[in-house]
Each structure stands twice: as structure tokens, then as C-alpha cells.
Image: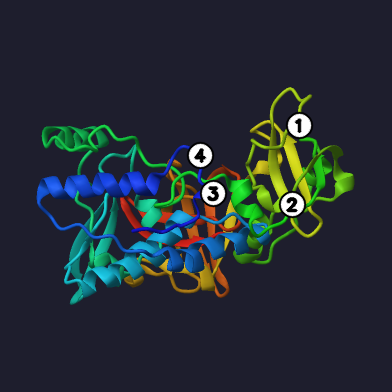
Amino acid sequence: MKNWHDDSVIISNECPWLEDSNDAMIVADKLGIPFQVVDLSEQYKERIVDYMFREYELGRTPNPDVLCNREIKFDVFLKIAMELGADYVATGHYCRKEVEEINGDIVYKLISGTDTNKDQSYFLCQLSQTQLSKALFPIGELTKPEVRKIAAEQDLITAEKKDSQGLCFIGKVRLPEFLQQKLQPKEGLIVQIPNDSTIYTREIPTFNSKEDELEFFSKKYEYKITDGKIVGKHQGAHYFTKGQRKGLAVGGTKEPLFVIDTDVNENVIYTGEGKNHQGLYRDVLFVTNEELHWLRNDLALKNGESCPVLARIRYRQVLEKAVLYKVEKGLYVKFEHMQSAITAGQFVAWYVKEELLGSGVIA
């Protein structure tokens, strides 16, 4: 897939698409299989890049790689592959697929990769049963070293190739420059909130229901400029995300400053000193019904139901114990332990044992 035309926002001296395309062509030639390139840059811009701009503008943090799999690889690309006569689309994701007949229906399961260090099931957390039915993950049972060994034995040019980084099929992107194409720089204040601020000793009310309690703890802290001290300036709150450390350019603190919240309306960044700052932590998040997705529709919770799961809010995060609570307006995820930098716009995915059951966009 060619997904991008504008090389001006790629980190210099790397042209990943061209290199990847040439490598794939050489491997295909060696294995004696047909090779074809499809240009999906128009659809990628519409469905992924424009979505990124919209999300950052709203002060949310998107995950383009999850969307790329749902919207491009297993939608546009899959349809083209089917038109060309393909039976499946195989990808190099470290995850597995299982098929089972349940109550007369064929159910496709998305299972974590055998290599727990490389498990990439999270990136496929938005796939549907139809998309999963046409997917193959041939290296899901293998570890990365085993894959490299097979490639070396076959004398493939990619055997020692570095792992890809950055945006799906685009490569590393200079994010501020990338965002500045649409989102103009705008000077604002950086405010540091003390860890012992009274904001964190808010009074806990008496709750009439479990839902009231979950709603209370899912809400992020609200800050005002007067709650802390002004420690610097930035060029746009929409360029920053919760939990971010780099790019603040503020010195004079014992520990680094972390972004604990952004206010894109007032163009203010709120920060806290150290990775243990209270402003980074929360144990409940919410997903609206519109953003709720079940890979296993047969296991979708009904209103009033709850279910213990393992969940993660970002790729490579160790799975954490949590409980799902389905309510009329959406779904709450309550973690057993406090989570750092629960970020609006990112995806939460939940599992039972090794199977990914569903996901949603954090509100």
C-alpha cells in the first residue's frame, strides 16, 4: 500500500515507503509470487490524517494505527484484494486467529500473539467478525527471533531489517510540523500544578448507585490557571497530550514535568512534576455507546451487566485487571489499580485470558 505522498513531513533521510516497497518486491520476486502496489493515499488522508487533525484540534489524542487497520488495511485494501481474486489478507501482526462454532454460528476469535513481548492484537481491536474472517496472521505463533531465523534461512533481504516505527505505512513523522499544516501555532501558558494541591483532596459524595460512583471517578480533574504557577510558554495546546514529557522545554525542577491536562479552548497546558504526580492517575474510564465495539458480539454486555477482564489503554502496556460495567449510555472500565495518563481519544481494549473481546475510544 502506498498511503502517503507528502515526504516533507517524514523525518529526513528516511523514505520508509520506498524502501519497504523495494524490499517487498525483492522478497516477492525471490519467492516467485506476484507483486502489486495499490495507491491508497487519498483514502488514507480522508479516513486517517483528517481524523488525526480533528482529534488533536479537540484536545484528544488519536491512535491512527488502530484506525489504519480498521479503515484501510482491512477495509479499502481488503476489498481491492478480494476484487483481484484473493481469498484472504495476511499481515505480519503478532497475534492469532481461532475459529469456533458457537450455537450454530461460526465465530472468529482474536488471540494474543505467542511472543508476549511483541503481541500486536491491540492494534486490531476495532476489527469486525467479517474483517477477521478474511484475515490471516501467519507469524502469530512465532517469536520475533524465530521469524528472523526463518527469513535468514530463506536468504531474504529483510531478515535483519529494523522494526518499523511511526505511522502505519508512512513511517516516523515530525508531529508538530505535521500538525502545523492544519493547526496553526498559538502561544499559550504552561502551568505547573503542585502535587499537594487541594484539587486532589476533593470531597467524595455519598453515591446513590454504582453508576453514580463510576461516573464520579471517571471524570478528570478540572484545573484553572490560578491553581498553579506559570512556568513557561508553548506554541499550541493541541500539539500536546496527557502524559507527555518531551517538548515542554521547562527547566528548574528536580524531576521532569509531565503534561497532566490540556485545555485547547483556553490554550493552556497543565503540568505536574514527576511521573508519580497525582494528576496523572485515575482508575475509571468511560466509553460512549457510539464508540463501543465488540469483536465478540455474542459476548457483548447488556445494560446492568458487569464482567471481570484484563485491559490495556495503550500498546505494550501489561494487561491489568479491570471490571466492565455496562450502563445505558455506555460502558465504564474500572481498573484494580490506578492507571497513568488515561487519555481521551485513545483506545481501551479488553481481554478474557488471551482473547481480545472488545474495545472503545476513551471519552
Does dot 4 land on a helix, a strand or a loop?
loop
Image depth: mark 3 or mark 1 in front? 3
Residue type pointed to by label 4: Ser
Q: CA distance from mark 3 to mark 1?
A: 28 Å
**Secondary structure found at label 3:** helix
The residue shown at (65%, 60%) is: 182
Q: Which residue is mark 2?
A: 185
CA gap between label 1 and label 2 equals 18 Å
Closer to viewer: mark 3 or mark 2:
3
Q: How is the image coloured?
A: rainbow
Identified at 76% across, 44% down, the residue is 270
| Mark seen at residue 12 | 4
Label whose residue precedes the other's in the sequence (4 or 1): 4
337 in relation to 185, above or below: above
* Separation (CA) of disc 3 from disc 2: 18 Å
Q: Which of the 4 image quarters holds residue 159?
A: top left
Establish if 156 lies above or below 21.
above
* Amino acid type of the residue that numbered disc 2 sits on in the rendered structure: Pro
Coordinates of residue 48 in the picture (x, y in percent): 49, 62
Q: Nearer the viewer, residue 103 or 141?
A: 141
Mark 3–mark 1 CB contact (< 8 Å) = no
Q: Nearer the viewer, residue 356 or 314?
A: 314
Q: Residue at x 28, y 53 (%)?
A: 111
Identify the residue position indicated by label 1 in the image.
Answer: 250
Sequence-first disc among 2 and 4: 4
